[in-house]
Image (cartoon, rainbow, N blue to C red):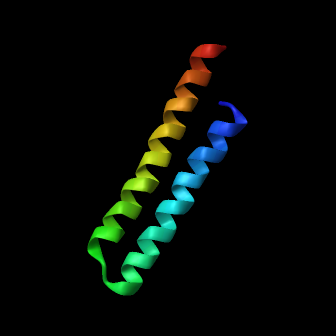
Amino acid sequence: MGMGDKIENAGDKVKGTAKEAAGKAVGNERLVAEGKADKTKGDVKQAGEKVKDVFKD
């Protein structure tokens, strides 16, 4: 996994956490859902990169 990919994946997770917290703070369920989706997107991308790394070796 390249360093840029790691940073991007971590960014998705951080962005998701911030959106989720903001949504909970203002009572916006759509924002909470978007935050959870962003966090999941980061997790899935990270898992995909790890799989690619396994097959690289």
Q: Looking at the rendering, which quadrant does residue 11 occupy?
A: bottom right
Q: Position of residue 48 (x, y in %)?
A: 49, 31
Left or right of 21 in this view: 5:
right
Rendered view: 14 above or below 51: below
Q: Quadrant of the C terminus?
A: top right
Residue found 45% across the figure and 76% down from its top: 21
Between 55 and 7, the one lying in front of the other is 7
Q: Examine the image and state in which quarter residue 4 appears.
A: top right
- Position in image of residue 26 (x %, y %): 37, 85
The residue positioned farthest toward the bottom in the image shown: 26
Residue 24 x, y percent position in the rendering: 37, 80
Total numbered circles: 0
Percent from the top left, x then y, of residue 41?
A: 43, 47
Give the camera-side residue of 57 and 44. 44
**Residue found at the very far left of the displayed protein:** 29
Q: Residue furthest right?
A: 3
Q: Residue at x 35, y 61 (%)?
A: 34
Tell which of 44 and 11 is nearer to you: 11
Where 6 falls versus 35 (above or below)?
A: above
- Image quadrant where residue 28 sits: bottom left
- Say left or right for 56 vs 23: right
Q: Residue at x 49, y 38 (%)?
A: 45
Q: Residue drawn at (65%, 30%), measured in percent from left and top?
A: 1
